[in-house]
Image (cartoon, helix red, strand yellow):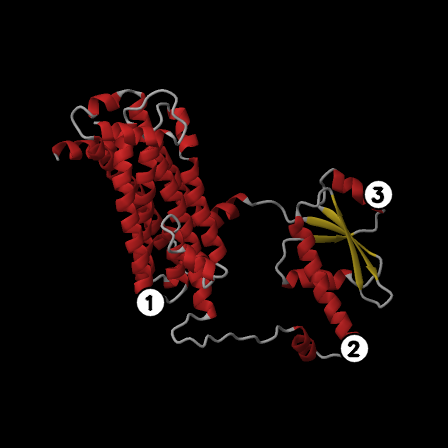
Amino acid sequence: MNNFFLILGHSYFSKLKAKSFIISTIIIAAAIILLANFESVISSLDRDEPSKVAVLDETGKLYDPLVQQLGMMESEIKLESSSQSTREIEKKIESEEIKGLLVLSESPEGLPLALYKSNSLSESNVSRELQVALQTIKSSLAANKLELSDEELALLSGRVTFEKLALVEGAKSEEELSQARGVVYVLLFFIYFSVIAYANMTAMEVATEKSSRVMEILISSVSPVKQMFAKIIGIGLAGLTQLAVILAVGYFTMIRKKDELVDGFFEGFGFESLSASVVMYAIIFFLLGYFLYATLAALLGSLVSRIEDVQQMILPMTFLIMIGFFISMFGLGNPESSFITVSSYIPFFTPMVMFLRVGMLNLPVYEPVIGIVILLATIVLLGVFGARVYRGGVLLYGKSNSYKDIKKAIDITSNK
């Protein structure tokens, strides 16, 4: 048992000391701090002068209302009425003295028509704001022609009242469902990237030791089965340490910026009303998903003799994780679909799809419990099978990029 903890400790601390591990942790933590201060950074960098747009008002009456409307919109566009020719203004645009040219004309019905010219159509913010302002002016002119009052115009352009009411007792409201969707969306990405990263790390660790012949020394003193589970747990602990650092940085950053983020990130993604049960299920399904795929990754990693073959060997496992993630993304729009319900009980998809259903719906407790039991049973079965393959796989050398090697590994284990 001492050898088990020795390998576990070695796997854990070797990962913590690895430059790639340290650099990736620092980069992710820095990215979180940057995202929390994104608006401040953008505002400090975005000190450009207001976008200047020349206006040729062929009607003689649309320029002033447009200036007033942009002022009410607090737009940074600066309009300049021009009497120059179109060609002269276009030269200014080409030399980037001004952003663009807006030509205003009138339709036979007396309503605004506009043509906007610029060097590129990729900068759509300016044209979009001008279009919104002109749309408001057009609505006002049309209302005057129809002799509509401001109240009648507001009534005409106002949105229809459309309420939704769930008949099932305890069902989430539209607002709660929208918030839950945001929370689940973020946490699904967290589970997906974490599981795929740490499972790949497990396969690489096994393949690295095997390719360096360190495995031959280890199996003489420690059984391959102990090695496999020691590495899985050791790398899992390293992953949890990394996540703890990232979450701690994220937590203290969010707390410091809470007042600024209340109406932004927290409200937009529903983190303001994040429940303890959702966090608990996220942790449970993350851990179970990791152990499921890490066991499979260790099994596949033991079959290769060269690090270069690892990615090819674990490609089907990566596809399984991706399929589960894409099913979950589909389920965000329709979590009660029969397809989503059935998929949530397929072990390789359960970590993400069942978590989706738990986060989005008010499920009876037995449903996620059944999913957890299925996952645990699959992990045990995969662990027993993986141990047999791992035990023989670590002794296989040469070109190993075929799944036929699984049978060879089992045969070696059986003959020992």
For badge 1, the amino acid type reads: Pro
Residue that sits furthest to the right in the current view:
108
Q: Nearer the viewer, mark 1 or mark 3?
A: 1
Q: Which residue is mark 1?
A: 364
* Residue 174 image point, x, y percent: 47, 69
- Are there few (<14), some (14-19), or many (20+) residues within 10 Å of tag 2? few
Q: Which residue is mark 3?
A: 87
Callout 1 secondary element = loop
For badge 3, the amino acid type reads: Arg
- Are there few (<14), some (14-19), or many (20+) residues within 10 Å of tag 3? few
Measure the alpha-carbon separation of dots 3 and 2.
38 Å
Callout 3 secondary element = helix
In the displayed structure, would residue 46 be above or below residue 363? above
The residue located at (42%, 44%) in the rendering is: 321
- Are there few (<14), some (14-19), or many (20+) residues within 10 Å of tag 1? few
Q: Earlier in the sequence, mark 2 or mark 1?
A: 2
**Which quadrant is home to the N terminus?**
top left
* Residue 193 image point, x, y percent: 40, 43
Q: Earlier in the sequence, mark 1 or mark 3?
A: 3
Measure the alpha-carbon separation of dots 1 and 3.
70 Å
Measure the alpha-carbon separation of dots 2 and 1.
57 Å
The residue located at (37%, 52%) in the rendering is: 350
